[in-house]
Amino acid sequence: MLKPNHIIAPQPPHRQPEIEIMLDEVFGLSRQTKTSYRLREGEQAVDGLSFIMTSEQDELLGAISFWNLRIGEAGTEALLLGPLAVDPAHRGQGIARELMQYGLNEAARLGHRLVILVGDEPFYARVGFKKVPDGQLLMPGPVDAGRLLYLELVDGALAMASGLVLSPRRYKS
Ligand SMILES: CC(C)(COP(=O)(O)OP(=O)(O)OC[C@H]1O[C@@H](n2cnc3c(N)ncnc32)[C@H](O)[C@@H]1OP(=O)(O)O)[C@@H](O)C(=O)NCCC(=O)NCCS
């Protein structure tokens, strides 16, 4: 349960530098070289699907965002979840789970059908993510196959998605 004094709100533009500093601290500066970042290059996070959690004192506790993807020749639409990060001083209080659940509910409400991510299955399984069957999705860079996960917001959505995962910009060009 969200602590009553914790607030989830859209990521405000003026807090972007603070969010980026937290992400650098949590993931290290090499985060920009990961395949998930390649999918975000030159793109904007999905409107209405980037959130922060703050404390009563307005401290930044955690952040999450979602990005548009296109999959395979059919260009099936999906979302990429991430980055998701929680300030080290505030971990283990359910902040990540709350942020994920909030973001996934909003994504479903906005009509999105499928979410994928690269991450630790034991952690993301807590909100329903499962491993993508081997070979169904091809990422545009190195990814440990056991860390490529999906969550259907609409039953059967994964069956419609197969092939190369691209950012919308690369899919068009
Ligand atoms: C992973 C992270 C987002 C979790 O944030 P959090 O607010 O502490 O998470 P929650 O409180 O919702 O959940 C904590 C639970 O998840 C577990 N957990 C955390 N990271 C895990 C992992 N990588 N694998 C499996 N379980 C994990 C914790 O052990 C804890 O278990 P418990 O509830 O049984 O005690 C945070 O540790 C973080 O920012 N880590 C660095 C960045 C990162 O790894 N991001 C995710 C990409 S894989």
Image (cartoon, rainbow, N blue to C red):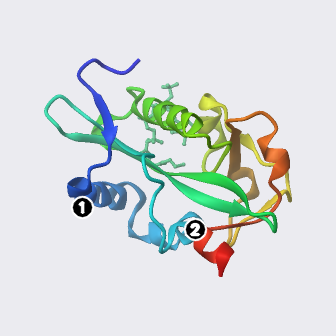
Rendering quarter of residue 27: bottom left
Rendering quarter of residue 153: top right
State whether residue 21 is above or below residue 112: below
Quadrant assignment for the N terminus: top left
> Mark 1 packing: few (<14 Cα in 10 Å), some, or many (20+)?
few
State whether residue 109 is above or below residue 40: above
The type of residue carrying mark 2 is Leu
The disc label shown at residue 17, or none: 1
**Residue at point 61% right, 52% down?**
79
Label 2–label 1 contact, CB within 8 A: no
Q: Residue 90 at x, y = what percent?
A: 31, 34
111 vs 4, left or right, is: right
71 vs 41, left or right, is: right
The type of residue carrying mark 1 is Pro
Closer to us: 64 or 73: 73
Q: Residue 126 at x, y = what percent?
A: 61, 29
Describe the element under mark 2 as helix, strand or loop. Answer: helix
Closer to us: 152 or 168: 168
Q: Residue 78 at x, y = what percent?
A: 66, 52
In the image, the residue with mark 2 has its CB under 8 Å from the nearest atom of ligand 1: no
- Dot 2 or dot 1: first in sequence order is 1
Q: Residue 40 at x, y = what percent?
A: 52, 67
Closer to us: 135 or 27: 135
In the image, the residue with mark 1 has its CB under 8 Å from the nearest atom of ligand 1: no
Residue at image mark 2: 39
State whether residue 118 is above or below residue 58: below
